[in-house]
Amino acid sequence: MKYALVNGERQEAQSSLSGKCPCCDSPVIAKCGKVRMPHWAHRGMCDPWWEGETEWHREWKGLFPKEWQEVIHFAENGEKHIADVKTDQDYVIEFQHSYIRPEECQSREVFYKKIIWIVDGTRRLRDKDKFIDVWEQSKAIHSKIEARRLLGYFDECALLRDWSDSTAPVFFDFRDDVLWLLLPKTIEGRYIFRIKRSELISYLLPASQIRFEAILKSMDNFLLTKEVLVSLQNSQHQPTNYSLRQRSRPRMAIPRKIKF
């Protein structure tokens, strides 16, 4: 953990401090060696969803306000877990480096309800190359916006297979200037959008005039535009009598300032 309670205040680990876990109130030990980053450690982790943090985790967390980091999220039945980040729009952001079982992924999505995954795409050496191959094979659905419709290439990419059943937005991070957003599955298929890392961060922060909620609605509405509908209907891989209007979300215009 990055933060523990020291005399009732959240503090980062220092070798001279003693703290308590904000989730279970058990004593935690400050680990401040030369090899691993400073952190607080239980003898046994109280939250089964918690994973050991990497520099990648910490770098992402550090992009958000301190009070958003490691927030305890409570369910009505009393169950509680520590969210990596919880925004002022009540989105929980989970940074996932290691493999996660589909059952646990589903449990977290049900528990948090409004969740965004940011996944370390560099854990396996071949994942980026395989992912880019899938992107290049997939169908471009607009002449100006970087968005592709996946036409059944999940078996060719382990990273996509791992997250194929997610019902939440999943951002793949290959540690460069762009992120790749896999939208939740809909009746008409799966879509990937390419978005700049800096833009996603700005949409999540409170100072932005355009917030993350508006981005998702804009992407959803984009898939209902005339050019995209015609493109999809002309695809040999999709029947032409389906209706994209079976979605439950309201239609919204795409803000002109948004760049995908």
Image (cartoon, rainbow, N blue to C red):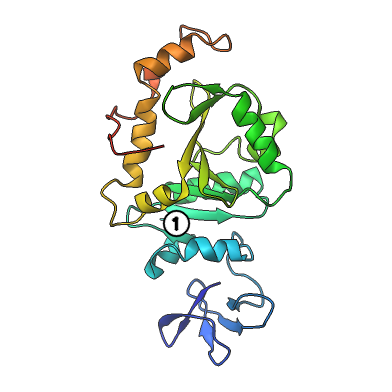
- Judge left or right: residue 243 versus residue 40: left
Considering depth in this image, is 26 or 195 the residue closer to the camera? 195
Q: Position of residue 12 (x, y in %)?
A: 50, 79
- The amino acid pointed to by label 1 is Asn
- 12 shown above or below 180: below
Considering depth in this image, is 182 or 25 the residue closer to the camera? 182
- 202 shown above or below 132: below
Quarter of the picture containing the N terminus is bottom right
Q: Position of residue 104 (x, y in %)?
A: 61, 49
Q: Position of residue 87 (x, y in %)?
A: 37, 57
Farthest residue, direction bottom: 16
Q: Residue at x 61, y 62 (%)?
A: 48
The quarter of the picture where residue 126 lies is top right
Q: Residue at x 36, y 45 (%)?
A: 212
- Judge left or right: residue 185 versus residue 87: right
Badge 1 crowding class, 10 Å Cα cut-off, few under 14, some 14 to 19, many 20 or more, is: few
The residue wearing badge 1 is 77
Instruction: Provide the secondary structure element on which disc 1 rests.
Output: loop
Quarter of the picture containing the C terminus is top left
